[in-house]
Amino acid sequence: MTHSHPSSSHGPSGHDHSSHRAPAPAASCCSSCGCGSSPPDSSGDDGHDHGTLPAWWRVAVALGLALGAELLGYLWPDAAWSRWGGMALALAAIGMAGTGVYWSGMRALFRGQLGILALMAVAVTGAFLIGHWAEAAMVMALFVAAEKLEDAAMHKARNAVRDLMLQLPDTATVVQPGGTPRTTALRDIVPGTLLRIAPGERIALDGVIVHGASAINQAPVTGESTPVLKTVDEPVFAGTINTSAELTVRVSHALGTTTLDRMVELVEQSQNARAPVQRNIDRFAAIYTPAVMVIALLLAILLPWLPGWSWQEAVYRALALLVIACPCALVIATPVAVVSALGNAARQGVLFKGGAALEKAHAIRAVAFDKTGTLTEGNTRLEAWQSAHATDGEAQVQIPALAAALAARSAHPVSKAIAQGLQASLAEPLPTPALANVHENPGAGLQADAQEGIWQGQRVRMGNLDWLAADGIVPTPALQSQIQAWRNAGFALTALECAGTIQAVFAVTDTVRGEAADVVAQLHGMGLRTALFSGDNVLAARHIAQRVGITDAHGGLLPAQKLQAIDALRQQAGATAMVGDGINDAPALAGSDLGIAIGGAQGTDIAAEAADVVLMDSRITALPQAFALARQTHAIVWQNMLLALLGKAVFMALAVAGYASMWMAVAADLGITLLVIANGMRLRQWHWGKSRKPL
């Protein structure tokens, strides 16, 4: 029953950041309740606008006037002055509370939009025409009071993340070229500016530390409960808190483009996106409300033909039926729960892209993981490497230089580890051979044209052994035994090939995330099946899978093969989620029933775009709780719908039987609606603890 009003439009905060991005208009139930309406500031094409809701003091006065009209009719029912006085009080009550709603309902009725507002307008008009002035006033006053309460409840549910903007400072301390600090408005700070962040200060803009080290409380962005130690060259994010030591930070994103801004924007978009169950309710309400109006009209017309019925009593029963049949509680059952859950999840650093993602998450039966950067830290390191030319001095010099130069052209963790490991393993810096036509095949490797050295003019490739084997390029016998030993140890292997020969093999290892085994155990406890789909070799994938408790492990998968593996798992277990963090995971994330991207604050933008859920933390700790929250949300949505439908059924029967007056009907509707809101709002405080509840 909530509607959007010009007076209730809220920005992300009361802060006077004049350059802050304006938030998207909050979605209202008005556009989804079957009333044929949309918020005044929305893009709806029906032109509906019920005006500005009055202030609370006007609603309170209206309720008092309506109560006064009721008392006059009760205490002096036969006095002419009482009837005229009651009419005057009723008109004053409607004028104080419901003029905008009433005329909006009449306009909707004239346009043939038989929704909630039209229903209220008909009920109030009908009550006045048959002399029930006090009840007409009470109906309007209670209806507007319910509108105000629901509007406030939805606004509160939506502000879980936008309120973070309140905490941002208006200014920051800029370090000028001479080292002198100067307080500067955030809107005037551009990327590249140096900021001085004092201990205990909230970081105003995204940036990279250039001097100092400190523990950063990242809970506002990632949901991490424990501060994270950050030092030189590591990123920090707007909205997080510097807890222990002074830092100098170089700004990377201006106001309006920070991680927090993108996070707020994503949450606003997700809250405006309706869940499938909500769309089904919309369709039901679009049929239900006109149907009730037709039934009420038939009652008013046919009942007077029965013995003992007057037309006034028949019309009154029909009007009472209209009031109690208002589908407000039903249509708010889903949005209040979904928005509360989305806000709660966002505070924990879990961004569901709308109610549809939340609804899909509750139906998941299997979870597939990528390996590198997902189940492992992603902080890969070069463990060892071996050349195929142990006796060729020139090759021994040029191989690491060429491998480091080519690997440095990729953002993949394995490539980075090889480039950094080769540079760090030698006493002197490696030269950087010239390369041309560098091209990366996601999930396979890199290739380029060498421009100098013994392989000048040759195509050079660096990637996994299966990729090279597809072209008939296999390791020399001298490398085979070492490769097998590394594989048995669970190392990821990358080969350097040129002129049709594997020139060297590099063994890279990674550290399993400390929380990975516990997360997998929690998922198993919830009745979910798990699998590991990796681009690394099968032995490395199985080695990591065994360590974290996953029995279904597949390695050597290209991006297209990961997607095929997702399809196979879906056929075996049901709806399947994919968890990953890299470019090569994007097809599987997009093709799964629920894509979950890891490390939204620092992760790959392509993976985040392809996913339905983004974990802002670089860890997977929140994953089981995200599924548990989705299940709890699903349960509460159905509780709300059953509560609304049963309540409607009971009071509709009472109204037809003559045991419920109009104002009692709307009061009952208000009570049911508030129960639905309270039940849905419980999700705002849902506890993110371990959940082992099976399906």
Image (spheres, helix red, strand yellow):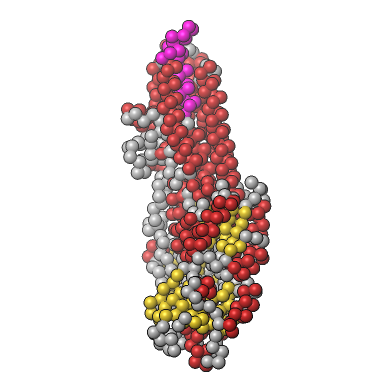
* Residue 660 vertical placement versus 1 (above, below): above
Q: Give the residue displayed 54% in from the left and 38% down from the top.
A: 677
Membership of 318 in magenta stretch: yes
* Residue ranking furthest to the front: 472
Q: Give the residue displayed 59% in from the left and 41% down from the top.
A: 635
Residue 249: image x %, image y %?
A: 48, 71
Residue 584: image x %, image y %?
A: 48, 65
Residue 302: image x %, image y %?
A: 43, 13
* Residue ranking furthest to the top: 307
Q: Is residue 632 visible?
A: yes
Which one is in front, 208 or 476?
A: 476
* Residue 195 vertical placement versus 505 (above, below): above
Which one is in front, 360 or 51?
A: 360
Which one is in front, 578 or 678?
A: 578
Membership of 454 in magenta stretch: no
Q: Give the residue displayed 40% in from the left and 30% down from the top.
A: 115
Q: Give the residue displayed 66% in from the left and 48% down from the top.
A: 693
Which one is in front, 292 or 399?
A: 399
Kindly report the secondary structure that dominates the magenta region of the rendered protein.
helix
**Magenta-drawn segment:** 301-326
Residue 200: image x %, image y %?
A: 55, 65
Answer with the quarter of the image where residue 378 lies.
bottom right
Q: Is residue 243 visible?
A: no
Answer with the quarter of the image where residue 458 lies.
bottom left
